Amino acid sequence: MADLRLENVSKRFGDVQVINGVDFAAKHGEFVVFVGPSGCGKSTLLRLITGLEETGGGRIFIGGADVTGMKPSKRGVAMVFQSYALFPHMTVEDNIGFGLRLAKLPKEEIGRRVAEAARILQIEDLLERKPRQLSGGQRQRVAIGRSIIRDPKVFLFDEPLSNLDAALRVQMRLEIARLHKRLGATMIYVTHDQTEAMTLADRIVVINRGRIEQVGSPIDLYDHPANRFVSGFIGSPAMNFIDVNEHGPENCTSLGAGSASIELDGCQVAGATAIGIRPEHLELAGPEEGDFPATVEIIEKLGAESLVYLQFDGSDLPLTMRTSPEHPLCAGETVHVRFNKDRIHFFDRDGKILNRP
């Protein structure tokens, strides 16, 4: 296993600049997740690391060695794709051992490695089956086994769970986390699902339009985002954003929602054009304690919690609040909402954050 380092890596397809001077380093044994919206360049960056695409500039180091010009087979990486890419006419055992047979390793060595990979992934009883006889999760385990058997320096995962149903995604997410703990390998994992990123990563790399917006632990990105893009992308449901109309006297800020305003008690930030607050940092209050009235539009009852979608009085601006399911709310009801003012994020006109709640 080894560390990974990218230095000013770029990639262009025709006139389109897909990757823009990316610098990043992953430590040995670290689980790093590349996350971002579709088309942001995260899968392209993964393909540059594995050598399936040539870099347009910059250098890539694996285990301290410059692998920028090396063929994929020489880089010491293994990639698990979104599609399982299994040979339908081969058994599970043959699929897992295929790469080693191409490398002409002794039959006994191949058998030993296949057996070890199957044990790690708990698929020993599936070795004689064909891919058509497997479930989606079992096929994904076989694809991962094909990577494990090569004993790579770095594992690369390109949205490996996107083809699975919701319950199976949760199960496979746990399996991948256990696999990382068992192997202690350096893993780079690409996903557009920020829940996967939050639950799996030691560190998250948030990518937007081919650039890195922020790198940090899941909790650091959630609590202390660098800008409005990261604030809105990390977290489910997303952070609420409200435009600021003006900063009035006596620390009163007028919001872009009808006549609503909030008292900031001295924490007003000059230059802010918008504020952000997460759904769990809103709470129901009485008419005297609430910051503003709002109308309940939709209630999603999720069991342990409810998501309440609100509208400001006199505005079409939506607002999401996370509440206890014990609150007896109904659609059309007018409620009073209070902000946790210690958890308000302030953004300037360019989306840069102005404070650190």
Image: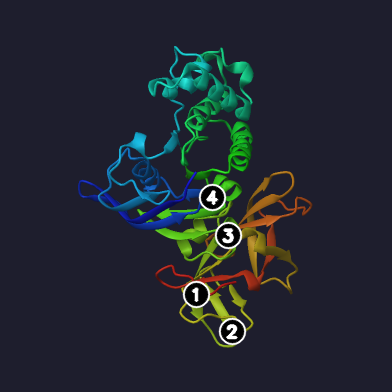
Secondary structure beneath disc 4? Answer: loop
Which amino acid does the dot numbered 1 rest on? Leu
Q: Residue at x 70, y 63 (%)?
A: 283
Q: Tally the marks.
A: 4
- Choose the circle earlier in sequence order: 1 or 3: 3
Q: Is residue 273 left or right of residue 310?
A: left
Density class for disc 1 (Cα within 10 Å; few <14, some 14-19, many ≥20) is some
* Residue that mark 4 sits on: 30
Q: Quadrant of residue 209?
A: bottom left
Find residue 251 and name its label: 2
Secondary structure beneath disc 1? Answer: loop
Q: Position of residue 328 (x, y in %)?
A: 77, 52
* Residue that mark 1 sits on: 354
Which amino acid does the dot numbered 4 rest on? Glu
- Mark yes or no: residue 331 visible: no
Front of the two marks 3 and 2: 3
* Residue that mark 3 sits on: 222
Q: Position of residue 298 (x, y in %)?
A: 63, 49
Relative vertical location of residue 67 with respect to residue 264 in this rendering, above or below: above
